[in-house]
Image (cartoon, grey):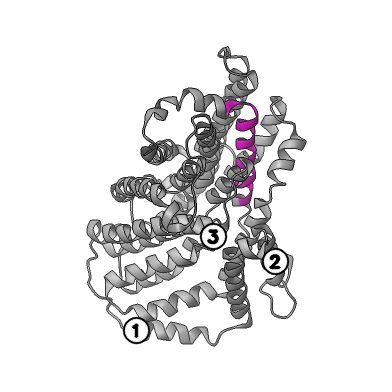
Amino acid sequence: MATASQAGTTGQQPVAAAKNSGIKWVYFIIGLAILGLFSILPVPADMKPQAMRTLGVMVTTVFWWLTETLPIPVTALMVPVMLHFTGILSLDKSIAQSFGDSFVPFLVGVLALSVAFTMSGLGKRITYLLLALSGTKVNRVIGIYFLVSFVISMFVTDVAVVAMMLPIVVGLLQSVDAKPGESNLGRGLMMAIMFGSTLGGICTPSGVASNVITMSFLTKAKIAVSFLDWVAIATPIFLVVGLISWWLILKIFPPEIKELPYGKEVIRKELRSMGSWSVEEITTLVVFLLAVVLWLTGSWNKMPIALVSLIILGLLSMPGFGVFKKWSDVEKRLEWGALMLVVGGFALGLGASQSGLAQWVAQHALKPMAVLPHALQPLAVTLLVAVDSLGFSSFTAAASVNVPFIIAYAQQNALPVLSLAIAAGFASSTHFILVTESPSFVLPYAYGYFSFKDLFKIGVIMTLISAVAIAAGLVIAGMPAGVPLP
């Protein structure tokens, strides 16, 4: 029999759900009103009517993303619908150029690899193997968690890496009785996997979806950037930022203990409990290494990165030794939301470019920046994107909105398009101020080991350091990396 308190709680749930649903209906109607308003507002003399309507689609989309009126991926899929009904782009054209973009199958393969790491247990085994080498000094343990997250996320999506690392982190914290909200060890380890997975993800096109968005818009601007080009430019920058962030974590949240109260034997015991390497783990490791080699040697083997991704999916599904025995193994675990966000982002950027909105914003809103010296342009772009990305709930959304505008700005002012577009893409993934800015932050936050204030305290510093490092790195990236920036 239910107690009075249980009955009261049960009764409150439908009321709260109904209230929440009512608020979301209000947000939905407000979004439609915004869309309608931008269709009837006076259009500036030098602006096309389609550009004004595209701005309305953008504002509506961002508003629905911020308020989570609809699930975020669903809002992304509403972009082609809104572009169609406002007469900006026909549905056929926006679907063909967003779903049909070659970076979509690339992302499918990357997400499938993330699933394989989790399903096979390879991610967990690699983590324990590295921890067995780290010893019990807490500073080193935090560094190892950071390093593992950084390296794996270079080829597996950042959200998947955080999800993979969380059970291991929580298990360690519980074993030393670290209290949520009280333990600096808890804060430090959670920050380590968050920052490590985010910074590592920026180093390769496969690491985070905002990179996919940036590369796609560069391709549409007829600027070719290979997988290796991206790695050569990004990795030195974010290795430096990573080392600084590890130092900052230890300084701002000094752990309450200097050494774990158990030795390497506990970690070895965990490894023994996992048993010998399974066929699925070996398959995942071999496919992973093959993919890395093929991606990095793309300029020599002439294999498109999307083709390599589809080969990954096929190899992981081979009878007898594949990780995926049936389609439902992939279907249930694949992060479809990330894929839909990328598709919606492509459509949003396409609408901005083809309606003339991106060019208009570049000519008017961004024009004051053009007086800055070329060497300061990446810093200006990075800071601008970091600030305006505060309201976005994903790195992909931030890149979708910002990168097309920055490309148009660079083209109109005869500035280095590649370096400024990459600056915008990098900055879309380096805003660490609010928990709500990425699912990679929300997942660890849910465990209660750090607060909004904790992330804000270190996040502001990290965001500024990232901006300076990106700007400095891009100014000199052409010579040491062998990648000429136009």
Q: Which residue type does callout 2 highlight?
A: Ile
Identity of the residue drawn at 65% across and 51% down: 103
Mark 3 or mark 1, which is nearer the start of the sequence? 3
Q: Pick the residue in front: 221 or 425.
A: 221
Disc 1, SS: helix
Q: Quadrant of residue 240?
A: bottom left
Residue, disc 3: 228
Image position, residue 229 (x, y; %): 52, 56
Q: Which residue type does callout 3 highlight?
A: Leu
Image position, residue 134 (x, y; %): 34, 77
Q: Is residue 323 above or below residue 29?
A: below
Identity of the residue drawn at 55% across and 55% down: 205
Q: Is residue 219 above or below residue 231?
A: above
**In this rendering, does residue 4 appear at all?**
yes
Disc 3, SS: helix
Residue, disc 2: 311
Q: Which mark is residue 64?
A: none
Q: Is residue 482 above or below residue 380?
A: below
Q: Which residue type does callout 1 highlight?
A: Lys
Mark 2 or mark 3, which is nearer the start of the sequence? 3
Cα gap from disc 3 to disc 2, whole angstroms: 19 Å
Q: Pick the residue in front: 445 or 337.
A: 337
| Label 3 Cα crowd, 10 Å radius (few <14 / some 14-19 / many 20+) | some
Q: Which mark is residue 264?
A: 1
| Magenta: main secondary structure | helix
Q: Pick the residue in front: 310 or 240.
A: 240
Disc 2, SS: helix
